[in-house]
Image (cartoon, coloured by chain):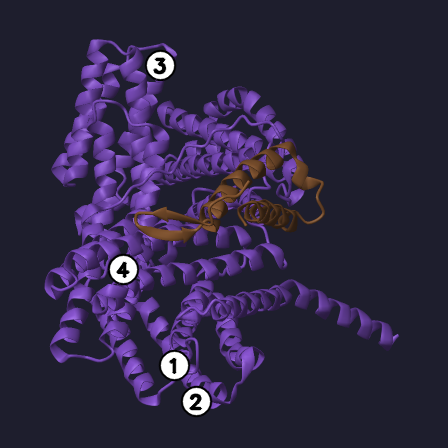
């Protein structure tokens, strides 16, 4: 019997290994094949620098083939743009180094700014267009008559690297993003169901879970953008995933608004109302998870959607029954009832889209995410890139530094590449660590292995350990940046072109230049810190407020999705979602949720009044919104009271209205009043501080 | 039919294989789209190998026309 036990143990261990570690080894094999393939082809074609092709492979290799394709595509575009700019600059001022370097700095500044504005791979293309100018322009400027050859060589090497990386990742154990996306969409639906069912929204414990789910929205969007090039899953499928993302956002906002409302009611002593509302709310949870299990696939989601719609059909009757148990002020109950209806509608839409995920018909159109950014932050990032080049280049010129080109190039690479990371200073420390390990490995490879190597096979054997080690590091989430530093520095220092050409003195000079450059860019990141500083958070909050103010004041009412996406994008860019543990970042998120809550009410109110309302009600509502906007502009007790008074006036102005629209207007006005009255909201906290 | 082996662009000569590569790529994109929509890829044993092989056929076919 012990034997049988051992076999089952062994099987379980084997399954674990196949699930967790085997993909890692597969990836490692892929990187090795692609890298050595690129090296082989470059040597075969007698390229000057096989390492450029290898670095390219190192940069674009990822575990999912769609990501590799997308990244390669943008790398190609970025490189071509950078090379063209380099040729232009060399043609214009090859003899004049000051205007040459100045225009280079401007170009790099523009590219870095572009990379901060855009997302994902597009942003990466901008980074590349920036530093390719250094890689090509600097050597070309020192020998202008060979500029075109250098440029053509570099483009060919990069092409070889890209072809190897994409072919290997498509042909050897391809892994599709499509399946990963489906998995994460499923997981999110069930996580959200569990959250709705298990947490009562009137305690604040659900918040951190909600925020983690919200961070997913953008990472799923990144996957979605990359899957465009993996064309064997259909376009409608991607559209539906995007639609699901949007619906999920709306559902979380409704959920959060309801939770806040219930908490406020409890604080102001309306316990009976809050109890009546949570009683009905609990039914939603039961319907989402019958028997305590959330929907795990499309079929079960369809069932959940059907159950939700029966609940929705009977909702009005249940609400009417529960209304009797509420406190005397029925308007508070009505506001909650309206929110419950909205949450149910959003959940239903979400579940339906999920259920239709694998159907073939194309009926869903997702709103695009658009681009939202803080112009000042972008300008600063651009300045940082340009400044880095200016500093390095002046040191290079005045000190007549032999490894100046190396230092300038790596400095620009490291000061632009991490501009979008949530905390660049930490990222650059890890990168530096990787660079140090990579240097040690490169030394060992260059002076102990390569000088004994003869022929391609031995060359491959000599470089393989370094490549494998770096690739292994990049497979682990905590070592990804270390691995990247290792990989880039290791490959850049490999001592062979078309023949063995390692020289210890030159090697040491280059190493010192590299480390100096990375350290300097670390200093610049610390000085111009756009990620974690208090200043950035204040700017983000300011922009969130101005979204609300815009919703109040703009001549045309904003679209709901616009507000939703704009606000979330701002917060995502500031990186706060990814540092949720930090107290100050949590305040940013609180602001996001508060701005969304108020913003949605404002938009709904304006839609109602500006379509159907008469003159008088339009005047009242506009006055109330103006005072709300004033309150958000600079929160103070006086302005809060003014806003409350104006809301009250508008509320009583609609007192006589008995039609559905009039009642809705009153509900929204009351909701805003309660939210602004709240002593615990972020606005009140800021006011107190 | 004999095609020129080199093409000239802005005073620099490129092997004619470069535009051939680009054209093959464009044709490939069109074919890829139609195959994905018609569901052919679901019937193929190893779709990525199929796509790669298709591209090689296109490109090499053009290369044979040129040389």
* Foreground disc of the pair 2, 3: 2
Q: Chain of mark 2?
A: A
Q: CA distance from mark 4 to mark 2?
A: 31 Å
Q: CA distance from mark 2 to mark 3?
A: 81 Å
Closer to the chain start, of discs 3 and 1, is: 1
Q: Which residue is mark 2?
A: A447
Q: Which secondary structure lies at badge 1? A: helix
Assess disc 4: are there few (<14), some (14-19) or many (≥20) residues with their C-alpha within 10 Å of its C-alpha. many
Q: Nearer the viewer, residue A665 or A545?
A: A545
Query: Would you say A17 lies left or right of A224 here?
Result: right
Q: Which residue is mark 3?
A: A661
Tell me the shade of chain B: brown
Q: Are marks 4 and 2 in contact (CB under 8 Å)?
A: no
Q: Nearer the viewer, residue A118 or A315?
A: A118
* Foreground disc of the pair 4, 3: 4
Tell me the shade of chain A: purple
Q: Chain of mark 3?
A: A
Q: Are marks 4 and 3 in contact (CB under 8 Å)?
A: no
Residue A439, labelled with which disc?
A: 1
Residue for point 14% across, 79% down: A399
């Amino acid at each position: 019997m012990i034997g049988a036990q051992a076999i089952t143990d062994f099987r379980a261990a084997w399954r674990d290994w196949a699930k967790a570690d085997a993909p890692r080894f597969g990836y490692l094999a892929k990187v090795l094949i692609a890298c050595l393939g690129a090296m082989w082809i470059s040597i075969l074609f007698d390229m000057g620098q096989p390492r450029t092709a290898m670095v390219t492979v190192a940069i674009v290799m990822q575990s999912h083939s769609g990501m590799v394709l997308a990244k390669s595509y943008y790398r190609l575009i970025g490189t071509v743009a950078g090379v063209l700019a380099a040729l232009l600059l060399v043609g214009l001022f090859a003899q004049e180094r000051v205007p040459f370097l100045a225009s280079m700095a401007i170009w790099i500044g523009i590219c870095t700014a572009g990379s901060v504005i855009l997302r994902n791979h597009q942003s990466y293309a901008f980074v590349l267009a920036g530093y390719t100018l250094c890689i090509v322009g600097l050597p070309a400027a020192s020998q202008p008559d060979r500029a075109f050859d250098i440029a053509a060589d570099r483009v060919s090497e990069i092409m070889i690297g890209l072809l190897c990386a994409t072919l290997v990742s498509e042909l050897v154990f391809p892994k599709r993003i499509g399946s990963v996306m489906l998995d994460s969409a499923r997981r999110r639906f069930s996580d959200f169901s569990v959250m709705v069912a298990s947490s009562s929204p009137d305690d604040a414990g659900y918040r951190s879970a909600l925020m983690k789910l919200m961070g997913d929205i953008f990472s799923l969007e990144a996957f979605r953008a990359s899957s465009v090039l993996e064309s064997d899953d259909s376009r409608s499928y991607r559209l539906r995933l995007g639609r699901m993302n949007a619906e999920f956002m709306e559902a979380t906002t409704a959920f959060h608004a309801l939770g806040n409302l219930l908490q406020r009611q409890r604080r102001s002593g309306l316990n009976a109302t809050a109890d009546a509302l949570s009683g009905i709310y609990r039914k939603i949870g039961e319907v989402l998870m019958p028997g305590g299990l959330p929907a795990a696939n499309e079929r079960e989601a369809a069932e959940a959607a059907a159950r939700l719609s029966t609940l929705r059909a009977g909702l009005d009757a249940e609400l009417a029954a529960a209304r009797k148990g509420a406190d005397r002020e029925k308007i508070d109950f009505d506001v909650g009832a309206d929110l419950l209806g909205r949450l149910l509608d959003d959940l239903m839409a979400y579940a339906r889209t999920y259920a239709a995920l694998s159907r073939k018909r194309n009926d869903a159109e997702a709103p695009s995410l658009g681009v939202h950014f803080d112009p000042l932050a972008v300008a600063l990032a651009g300045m940082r890139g340009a400044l880095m080049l200016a500093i390095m280049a002046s040191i290079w010129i005045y000190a007549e530094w032999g490894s100046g080109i190396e230092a300038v190039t790596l400095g620009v690479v490291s000061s632009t590449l991490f501009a979008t990371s949530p905390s660049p200073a930490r990222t650059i420390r890890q990168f530096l660590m990787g660079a140090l390990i990579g240097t040690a490995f490169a030394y060992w490879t260059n002076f102990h292995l390569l000088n004994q190597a003869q022929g391609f096979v031995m060359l491959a054997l000599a470089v393989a350990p370094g490549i494998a080690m770096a690739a292994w590091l990049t497979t682990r989430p905590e070592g990804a940046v270390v691995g990247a530093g290792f990989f880039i520095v290791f490959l850049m220092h490999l001592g062979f072109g078309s023949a063995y050409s390692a020289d210890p003195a030159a090697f040491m000079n280059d190493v010192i230049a590299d480390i100096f450059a990375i350290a300097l860019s670390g200093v610049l990141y610390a000085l111009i810190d756009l990620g974690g500083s208090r200043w950035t958070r204040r700017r983000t909050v300011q922009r969130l407020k101005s979204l609300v103010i815009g919703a109040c004041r703009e001549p045309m009412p904003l679209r709901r999705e616009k507000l939703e996406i704009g606000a979330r994008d701002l917060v995502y860019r500031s990186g706060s979602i990814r540092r949720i543990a930090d107290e100050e970042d949590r305040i940013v998120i609180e602001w996001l949720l508060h701005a969304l809550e108020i913003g949605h009410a404002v938009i709904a109110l304006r839609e109602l009044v500006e379509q159907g309302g008469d003159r008088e009600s339009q005047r009242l509502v506009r006055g109330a919104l103006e005072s709300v906007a004033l309150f958000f502009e600079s929160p103070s007790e006086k302005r809060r009271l003014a806003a409350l008074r104006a809301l009250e006036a508008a509320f009583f102005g609609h007192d006589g209205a008995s039609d559905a629209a009039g009642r809705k207007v009153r509900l929204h006005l009351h909701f805003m009043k309660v939210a602004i009255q709240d002593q615990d909201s972020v606005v009140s906290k800021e006011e107190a501080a | 039919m004999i095609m020129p082996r080199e093409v000239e662009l802005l005073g620099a000569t490129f092997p004619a294989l470069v535009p051939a590569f680009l054209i093959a790529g464009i044709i490939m994109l069109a074919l890829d789209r139609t195959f994905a929509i018609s569901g052919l890829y679901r019937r193929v044993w190893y779709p990525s190998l199929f796509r790669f092989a298709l591209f090689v056929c296109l490109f090499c076919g053009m290369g044979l026309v040129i040389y």
